[in-house]
Amino acid sequence: MTYIVTENCQQCRFTDCVSVCPVDAFHGDAEMIYIDPDACIDCGACEPQCPVKAIFEDRDAEKKPELKPWIEINKRKAPGLPMYNTKQAALPTADARKKALGF
């Protein structure tokens, strides 16, 4: 098992989660961050840190089919992107996106 980052991270890219990751599993692009499933040790430290509830266990996709595509998206994208392991400023669109998501 591993954790995945989902669509709630798009246009936010809050990085509260990356600073608690003990194995540097987070990678990001201009829109969001992703978790490398080969690096993730399933510790769960990141999930409660996300202010927009974008992080889930991959096994949650069994109950929530809308999460299933994100397993492959994280697996495909994360390894080729820069690593994030320290908290950084969120995207300029983050506050509006967070509000639109109801957080």
Image (cartoon, grey):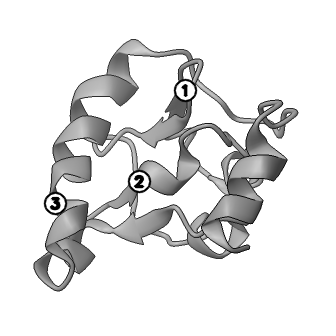
Q: Secondary structure beneath disc 3?
A: helix
Mark 1, other Cα within 10 Å: few <14 / some 14–19 / many ≥20 = some
Q: Which dot, 1 or 2, sits closer to the camera?
A: 2
- Residue position for label 3: 68
Q: Secondary structure beneath disc 1?
A: strand
Q: Is residue 62 above or below residue 78?
A: below
Amino acid type shown at disc 1: Gly
The percent coordinates of residue 87 (x first, y second) are 83, 40
Quadrant of the snapshot with the N terminus: bottom left
The percent coordinates of residue 10 (x first, y second) are 54, 41
Q: Which residue appears at 62% of the width and 37% of the height?
A: 11
- Residue position for label 2: 6
Amino acid type shown at disc 3: Lys
The tag earlier along the polypeptide, 1 or 2, is 2
Amino acid type shown at disc 2: Thr
Q: Is residue 29 above or below residue 67?
A: above
Tell me, yes or no, whether the two marked residues, 2 and 3, touch with CB atoms within 8 Å. Answer: no
- Of the numbered discs in the image, which one, if any, rests on residue 9? none
- Of the numbered discs in the image, which one, if any, rests on residue 28? 1
Q: CA distance from mark 1 to mark 3?
A: 20 Å
Q: Which residue appears at 62% of the width and 52% of the height?
A: 22
